Image (cartoon, grey):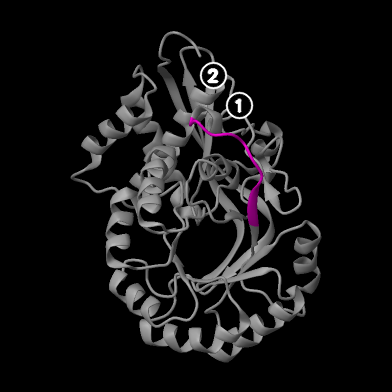
C-alpha cells in the first residue's frame, strides 16, 4: 500500500434504473427494474473507489444523489480512514437520525471508501480485512413464484448448482402460501434449502398461524414475518415457531442489531450493507453475531457481501439477486452454487455504455 494515507479528491453519484433478469414480486408490489445510485470516490492518488446502493423505487434516487454529493463536498480533502469518517458522519447526523436516506448514503460512501483502499493496495477487500477469498454457499433469491409457471426458472437455479432457494409469501392467503411452498418443495426435492420471506406483511397472530401450516415442508427459515421494528412481535413469533426466524435486512446500523439480539427477535440475522454503515458497520455486527452464536447471512449486494461474509465468524448464506449485473463490466459469476469475492477492492467495474442507457 502507498506510504501516505489517500485523501478524497471528489465524490460523484449517478442514478440509473437498470434492468433485472427476473421481476421481484412481494407482498406490497412488483419491482420490475433496479433503481440504483452509483458512487465514485476519486482519491488524490489516482484511484477511484466504486459502490452502488439500491433505492427500492425511483422516487428515492434524486434525493440520494443530492445527499451523497453534498456529503462528499464536506468530505473533500479528508483522509480515507473509514472508521474516522464514520465517526465524523455520526457526529454530523446524530441529531437528525441515521435511518432512511441518510443511512443509505453513509453506508454507500463507506463501501466506496473501502473499495478505494483495496484498489490502492491492489488486493481484494477480503484480504485487506485479514481474510481470504473463498467460495461462499449462495441461495438464489426469488420474489413470489408459482411452482408451475416458474418451474423452468427454478430448475435453472438448480442447474447452476444453487443449494438454496428463497421465495416470497404474503401476497395471498395462508392456503396460497402453503400451495406454493408445497409445490416448490416437491420440485426442489429434500436436499435443497428452501426459505420464505414475508417482507413484514403479517401480524404476530397471523404469522404464527401461517408458520404452523408451513412447518411440514422443511423450511430453513421464515424471514421478516412481522414489521421489522416490532422486536417484541418477532420474539413472540420466534418463541412458538417450529421454523427458525430470520430478520435484519431492515435493522439500521450496529445499534439496531444490539437491540434486536437483546430482544431475542430472531434465530438468524442478515444485515444489509446499505443499512448498517457499509463495511465498517458490518464488521461491528459480525462481532455481535459471533458473541451471541447467531448465524449471519447477507442481504443483497452479493459482490460486496462476498468479501465481508468471508470474514464473518458465523457466516451462513450469501443472498444472490441480480441488481447490478446490467451496469457492471464483469458481472458476478456463480460457480456450482457459490460466489467468490473478486478484487481489487470490491471487484466492481462500471459498464459505462450500459450506464449511459439507463441514466435518469
Question: In the image as oriented, which residue stretches furthest toward the left?
Answer: 95
Judge by depth and name the residue closer to the eye, 2 or 26. Answer: 2
Q: Is residue 142 above or below residue 51?
A: below
Residue at the far top in the pictured view: 3
Residue 122 point in image, percent of width and height: 59, 20
Q: Quadrant of residue 305?
A: top right
Q: Nearer the viewer, residue 299 or 240?
A: 240
Element under disc 1: loop
Q: Position of residue 16 (x, y in %)?
A: 58, 44
Q: Are marks 1 and 2 in contact (CB under 8 Å)?
A: yes
Residue linked to disc 2: 121
Residue 205, quarter of the rendered image: bottom left
Q: Across the whole image, how many numbered discs are drawn on residues?
A: 2
User: Percent position (x, y) of residue 196?
Assistant: 56, 73
Number of residues whose C-alpha sits closer than 10 Å to that of mark 2, classed few (under 14), some (14–19) or many (20 or more): some
Gap in Å between the C-alphas at discs 1 and 2?
8 Å
As displayed, is residue 37 above or below residue 115?
Answer: below
Q: Is residue 56 visible?
A: yes
Is 2 rendered above or below residue 354?
Answer: above
Q: Earlier in the sequence, mark 1 or mark 2?
A: 2
Q: Which residue is mark 1?
A: 344
Horizontal and vertical percent position of residue 222 = 50, 73
Name above or below for residue 254 compared with residue 212. above
Q: Is residue 45 magenta?
A: no
Q: Is residue 68 left or right of residue 93?
A: right
- Chain part drawn in magenta: 129-138
Instruction: Say whether residue 135 is magenta.
Output: yes
In the displayed structure, does residue 70 sit left or right of residue 44?
left
Amino acid at each position: 500500500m502507498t506510504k501516505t494515507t489517500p485523501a478524497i479528491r471528489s465524490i460523484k453519484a449517478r442514478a440509473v434504473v437498470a434492468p433485472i433478469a427476473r421481476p421481484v414480486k412481494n407482498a406490497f408490489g412488483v419491482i420490475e427494474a433496479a433503481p440504483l445510485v452509483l458512487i465514485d470516490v476519486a482519491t488524490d492518488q489516482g484511484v477511484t473507489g466504486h459502490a452502488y446502493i439500491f433505492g427500492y423505487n425511483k422516487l428515492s434516487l434524486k434525493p440520494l444523489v443530492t445527499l451523497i454529493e453534498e456529503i462528499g463536498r464536506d468530505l473533500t480533502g479528508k483522509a480515507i480512514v473509514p472508521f474516522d469518517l464514520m465517526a465524523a458522519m455520526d457526529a454530523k447526523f446524530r441529531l437528525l437520525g441515521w435511518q432512511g436516506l441518510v443511512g443509505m448514503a453513509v453506508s454507500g460512501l463507506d463501501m466506496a471508501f473501502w473499495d478505494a483502499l483495496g484498489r490502492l493496495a491492489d488486493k481484494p477487500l477480503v484480504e485487506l480485512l485479514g481474510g481470504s477469498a473463498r467460495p461462499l454457499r449462495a441461495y438464489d433469491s426469488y420474489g413470489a413464484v408459482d411452482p408451475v409457471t416458474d418451474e423452468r426458472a427454478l430448475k435453472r437455479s438448480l442447474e447452476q448448482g444453487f443449494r438454496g432457494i428463497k421465495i416470497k409469501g404474503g401476497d395471498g392467503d395462508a392456503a396460497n402460501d402453503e400451495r406454493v411452498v408445497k409445490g416448490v418443495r416437491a420440485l426442489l426435492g429434500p436436499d435443497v434449502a428452501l426459505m420464505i420471506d414475508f417482507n413484514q406483511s403479517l401480524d404476530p397472530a397471523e404469522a404464527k398461524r401461517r408458520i404452523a401450516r408451513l412447518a411440514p415442508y422443511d423450511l430453513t427459515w421464515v424471514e421478516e414475518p412481522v414489521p421489522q421494528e416490532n422486536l417484541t412481535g418477532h420474539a413472540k413469533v420466534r418463541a412458538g415457531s417450529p421454523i427458525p426466524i430470520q430478520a435484519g435486512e431492515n435493522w439500521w446500523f450496529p445499534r439496531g442489531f444490539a437491540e434486536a439480539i437483546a430482544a431475542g427477535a430472531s434465530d438468524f440475522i442478515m444485515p444489509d450493507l446499505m443499512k448498517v454503515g457499509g463495511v465498517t458497520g458490518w464488521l461491528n455486527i459480525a462481532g455481535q453475531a459471533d458473541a451471541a452464536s447467531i448465524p449471519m447471512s447477507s442481504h443483497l449486494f452479493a459482490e460486496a457481501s462476498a468479501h465481508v461474509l468471508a470474514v464473518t465468524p458465523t457466516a451462513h448464506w450469501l443472498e444472490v439477486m441480480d441488481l447490478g449485473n446490467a451496469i457492471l463490466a464483469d458481472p458476478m459469476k456463480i460457480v456450482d452454487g457459490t460466489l467468490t469475492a473478486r478484487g481489487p477492492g470490491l471487484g466492481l467495474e462500471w459498464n459505462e455504455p450500459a450506464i449511459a442507457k439507463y441514466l435518469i
